[in-house]
Structure formats: structure tokens, C-alpha cells
Image (cartoon, rainbow, N blue to C red):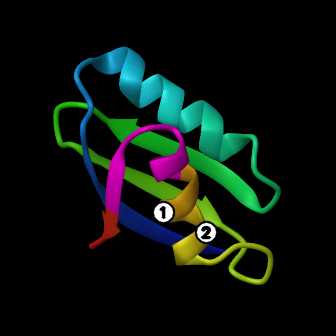
Amino acid sequence: MQKKKFKIEGMHCTSCAMSIDGELEDMDGVKCASTSYAKQETEVEYDEKKLSEKKIVEIIEKAGYSASST
């Protein structure tokens, strides 16, 4: 398992953060996701054998936000 932080742009409220968490946690290979609206970032614990950083960014962008690994 790997833990990685991603910078998020485009969140407007805590509901946005909860939406990102839900999208990520639905993915096979994600153990947990914790998104902070105040910090404008998310921390994801995931199985790097099942999921790549690139795929995590794609999931966040598909939800309507911009993301980059930190």
C-alpha cells in the first residue's frame, strides 16, 4: 500500500471534498481517501499494483476537479 497527497483545484465547499472521497473510495485498489476542502488536497491510500497516480488524477478530473500529485 502507498499513501500519496494530491493538490485539488476547483472545490467550492465540503460537499465537493465528500464527492471526491466517494469517487476515489469506489475504485478497486483504494483503501481510503481523505479530502480536505480547507487544505485543497486529498490523501489517498491505495494499492500501487492495482492503481497508478495517473489513474487517481483521472478519477478526480472526471469528477470535475483539477488534480496534481505533490
Q: Residues within 10 Å of mark 1 (few under 14, many from 20)?
A: many
Extent of the magenta region: 60-67
Image quadrant in which the N terminus is located: bottom right
Q: What residue sits 48% from the left and 63% below the top?
A: 57
Q: In percent of the image, x 53 and y 75: which residue is there?
A: 53
**Residue 45 at what x, y percent from top left?**
58, 61
Q: CA distance from mark 1 to mark 2?
A: 5 Å
Amino acid type, label 1? Val
Q: Is residue 49 magenta?
A: no
For the residues labelled 1 and 2, say whether their Cβ atoms are less than 8 Å apart.
yes
Indicate which disc residue 55 carries.
2
SS of the residue under disc 2: helix
- The answer to whether 14 is drawn above or below residue 69 in the figure is above
Which residue position is annotated with label 1? 57
The location of residue 55, given as percent across then percent down, is: 61, 68
> What residue type is disc 2 on?
Lys
